[in-house]
Amino acid sequence: MQVLNVSNGCIRCGGLVLTDGSTGERFCQKCGNVIVESIDDSRQERRSFTTDSINNSRTGTPNLLAIHDRGLATVIGGTKDSTGKPISSTMRQDMRRLKIWDSRSQSDNAGRNMRIAFIELGKLRDKLTLPDTVIEKAAYIYRKAAKKGLIRGRSTPNVLAASAYAACRDTGTPRTLVDFSDALNIQKKAVSASYRMLLKELNMKMPIMDSMNCISQIASKLGIDEKVKRYAYDILREANRKEETAGKGPMGLAAASLYMACINGVY
């Protein structure tokens, strides 16, 4: 039982009056007399979407950019009213007509493009095991490009893959253009061209990918143990100290350091 409030003044025995936060009852602690069976909750609406909250039952569906309607869709239909009673045939026809007009109003080209694009974005998340922060960033970049009219005349998978790759670069997630082209079965050249277009039109500045983060990704794919990975880190750290990695691709440097660790007899 969660007690929210304590007050004095039981009408029977004068004992303390407690308020149960889960049931909304007000009762006497001494004699158990229920004064009010349920009260209105005047607390502020919970708006925390984190999973570590105690009770998120009142938060509703989170407003996510990776959902084409941001989780604010309107569903019209049903054969019963709010009390559970069947509605009349006239009202049922009116609801069916409203449902048709609502579906027609949402079938514009922009909404249809967002729906298709974010379905593909969900597939990308599953295939490449992308975190939610990258997915939200990719959806933000794609929406920004669509708002400026950059999607018109271009392939949706190409721009979507470029947006996801830009989100990975911005968050420091080690993924390559080849990963996105293979996941969506498109050409790497097309994804690269769309990525350069986004950088130019949206005036985006991307940080340089850290080659240290790429070692874990390559090692996990090849099944290399932790000892080789630590030796590869040492090789790459020494190369960075001697400034021999300038202008080199981060994935290539990570692969080369792992290869050197393997051929030196560690693996």
Image (cartoon, helix red, strand yellow):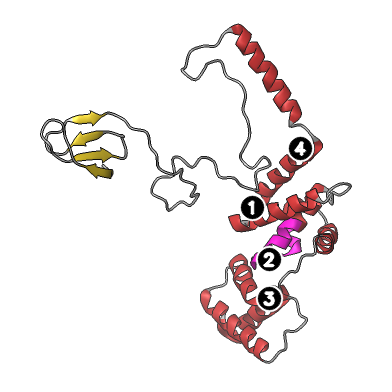
Residue sitting at 64 percent across and 83 percent down?
236
Is residue 21 in view from this perspective?
A: yes
Q: Which mark is residue 170?
A: 2
Q: Secondary structure at mark 3?
A: helix
Closer to the N terminus: mark 3 or mark 4?
Answer: 4
The magenta segment is: 163-180
Name the residue located 75 percent from the left edge and 62 percent from the top edge. 178
Q: Amino acid at mark 1?
A: Arg
Q: Secondary structure at mark 2?
A: helix
Marked residue nearer the N-terminal end (2 or 4)? 4
Q: Name the amino acid type tagged 4.
A: Arg
Instruction: Choose the circle earlier in sequence order: 4 or 1.
Output: 4
Mark 4 and mark 1: Cα distance apart in space: 20 Å
Give the Cα distance between marks 3 and 2.
22 Å
Residue 182 seen in render: no
Picture quarter with the N terminus = top left
Q: Which residue is mark 4?
A: 112
Circle 1: element type: helix
- Tag in front: 3 or 4: 4
The percent coordinates of residue 188 (x first, y second) are 81, 60
- Relative to 60, is 206 above or below? below
On residue 125, the disc is 1
Instruction: Count how many numbered circles sit on residues in the image.
Output: 4
Res. 87 image quadrant = top right
